[in-house]
Image (cartoon, rainbow, N blue to C red):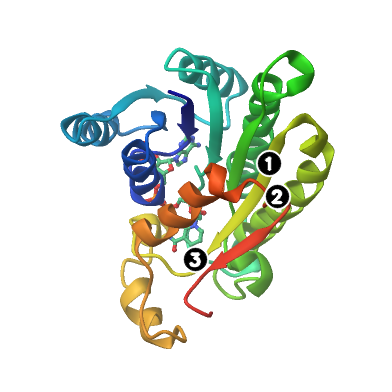
């Protein structure tokens, strides 16, 4: 059984991805930053469905934590997939009110965290080091191309960096049997919006999405698990919008 690391797997899109991946036969290591109980509940749900999972506390903004999380994943089985999902959005604000502290935390989590996660994945997966390749999926956002004016331009910029990371890395490691793809969710019904100070955002903006509603975490998870699977063996360097046409 090959293993998959899902960063930020205790809630929302990451939790849904962990559950779907386990049902598809992956041994899943999920990380959380603060909510151990939520992570334990995801592991328990997977195990009660007959799957294999473990949870580890890891802040993706801390290099040593990411290294430890990848290491822990390999104890479940040979590393086959990494999903760089953990991310933060910050309070809704115009650029006037942005602080360097907020932007630094945003970039450390969403950009440096994703880059270090990819680095550790490549170190473990590269055929150049005697492994047999694998899949990396980066979770970006529709904000990367919409810019999020008046809400969080710093978040949008951080996700644009994630898009570019995926494009370059896919070409860099293709010859080593590693596929890299990016998923760009639209407005998804998770706790992210409340954590950004906008608990009503899904209800407010959902009807304006072309399909008339916000998406679910499981709809994003389906795309991530497919991209991680052998069915996507010829798909690399792609950026997949899962955004209801937004
Ligand atoms: P949630 O807020 O529901 O979940 C976030 C997860 O990430 C939690 O498990 C949280 O753990 C973890 N996390 C946050 N910061 C860190 C960190 N520094 N280190 C490790 N783990 C961390 O968010 P979503 O599921 O909605 O978002 C997942 C991804 O999808 C993010 O990258 C987000 O930007 C992206 N996305 C979401 C959209 C949406 O509408 N929901 C739209 C577009 C993109 P803990 O709870 O323990 O802190």
Residue 240 is situated, as x and y percent measured from the top left of the image, at 60, 62
Residue 73 is situated, as x and y percent measured from the top left of the image, at 47, 20
CA gap between label 3 and label 1 equals 34 Å
Residue behind mark 1: 179
Residue visible at 38% across and 69% down in the picture: 215
Q: Earlier in the sequence, mark 3 or mark 2?
A: 3
Question: Which quadrant: the N terminus?
Answer: top left
Q: Name the quadrant containing residue 27.
A: top left
Q: Nearer the viewer, residue 78 or 63?
A: 78
Q: Nearer the viewer, residue 195 or 205?
A: 205
Residue 242 is situated, as x and y percent measured from the top left of the image, at 51, 67
Relative to 214, does residue 211 appear above or below in the rendering? below
Between marks 3 and 1 in the image, the one whose residue lies nearer the viewer = 1
Residue 111 is situated, as x and y percent measured from the top left of the image, at 66, 43
Q: Are marks 3 and 2 in contact (CB under 8 Å)?
A: no
Q: Are marks 1 and 2 in contact (CB under 8 Å)?
A: yes
Q: Secondary structure at mark 2?
A: loop
CA gap between label 1 and label 2 equals 5 Å
Residue behind mark 3: 92
Q: Residues within 10 Å of mark 1 (few under 14, many from 20)?
A: many
């Amino acid at each position: 059984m090959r293993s998959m690391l899902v960063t930020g797997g205790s809630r929302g899109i990451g939790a849904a991805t962990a559950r779907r991946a386990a049902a598809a036969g992956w041994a899943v290591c999920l990380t959380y930053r603060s909510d151990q109980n939520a992570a334990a509940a995801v592991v328990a749900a997977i195990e009660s469905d007959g799957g294999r999972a473990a949870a580890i506390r890891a802040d993706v903004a801390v290099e040593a934590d990411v290294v430890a999380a990848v290491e822990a994943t390999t104890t479940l089985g040979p590393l086959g997939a990494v999903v760089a999902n953990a991310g933060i959005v910050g309070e809704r604000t115009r650029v006037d009110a942005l602080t360097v502290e907020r932007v630094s935390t945003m970039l450390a989590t969403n950009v440096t965290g994703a880059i270090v996660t990819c680095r550790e994945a490549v170190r473990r997966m590269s055929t150049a080091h005697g492994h047999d390749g694998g899949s990396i999926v980066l979770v970006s956002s529709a904000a990367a191309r919409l810019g999020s004016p008046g809400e969080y331009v710093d978040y949008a910029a951080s996700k644009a960096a994630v898009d570019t990371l995926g494009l370059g890395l896919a070409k860099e490691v293709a010859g080593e049997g590693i596929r890299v793809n990016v998923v760009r969710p639209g407005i998804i019904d998770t706790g992210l919006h409340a954590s950004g100070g906008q608990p009503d955002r899904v209800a407010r903006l959902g009807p304006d999405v072309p399909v008339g509603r916000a998406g679910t975490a499981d709809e994003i998870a389906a795309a991530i698990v497919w991209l991680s699977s052998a069915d996507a063996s010829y798909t690399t360097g792609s950026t997949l919008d899962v955004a209801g046409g937004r």
